[in-house]
Image: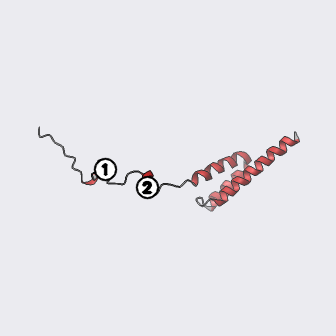
């Protein structure tokens, strides 16, 4: 039984250390946020570490650059090749 407790404790410590390093290396979150996350990680060893790793992983995802294919069409670009800003929407049939 002592082996099981020691193993679970060791796993929790490694997980908490990994989460702490991940938090401290993040350039996206500020100092108060890092402090709060570290408190949660060490207060709730396994759950806090898992949550912190998820949060830091999501915050490191790079957003698409403006003008790249991932950011969508720019303002004024129509799918038909025309300009939406200068398009005449008056299509009266003369009836």
Tell me which residue sits at (32%, 53%) in the image: 77
The residue pinned by badge 1 equals 78
The residue closer to the viewer here, 9 or 74, is 74
Q: Is residue 73 among the parts visible in the rendering?
A: yes
For this view, does 29 lie left or right of residue 95? right
- The image shows residue 2, relative to residue 36, as above or below, that is above
Q: Give the residue at x 72% y 46%.
A: 46
> In the rendered image, which quarter is residue 37 located in?
bottom right
Disc on res. 51: none
Image location of residue 12, percent across then percent down: 76, 47
Q: Quadrant of residue 21?
A: bottom right
Q: CA distance from mark 2 to mark 1?
A: 16 Å
Where residue 56 appears, as percent x and y from the top left, is: 62, 53
Q: Which mark is residue 68?
A: 2
Q: Secondary structure at mark 1?
A: loop
Q: x, y (%) of residue 20?
A: 70, 56
């Amino acid at each position: 039984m002592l082996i099981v407790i020691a193993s679970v404790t060791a796993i929790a410590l490694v997980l908490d250390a990994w989460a702490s390093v991940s938090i401290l290396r993040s350039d996206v979150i500020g100092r108060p946020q890092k402090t709060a996350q570290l408190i949660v990680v060490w207060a709730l060893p396994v759950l806090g570490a898992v949550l912190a790793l998820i949060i830091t992983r999501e915050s490191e995802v790079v957003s698409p650059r403006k003008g790249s294919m991932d950011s969508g069409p720019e303002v004024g670009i129509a799918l038909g090749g025309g300009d939406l800003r200068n398009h005449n929407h008056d299509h009266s049939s003369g009836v």
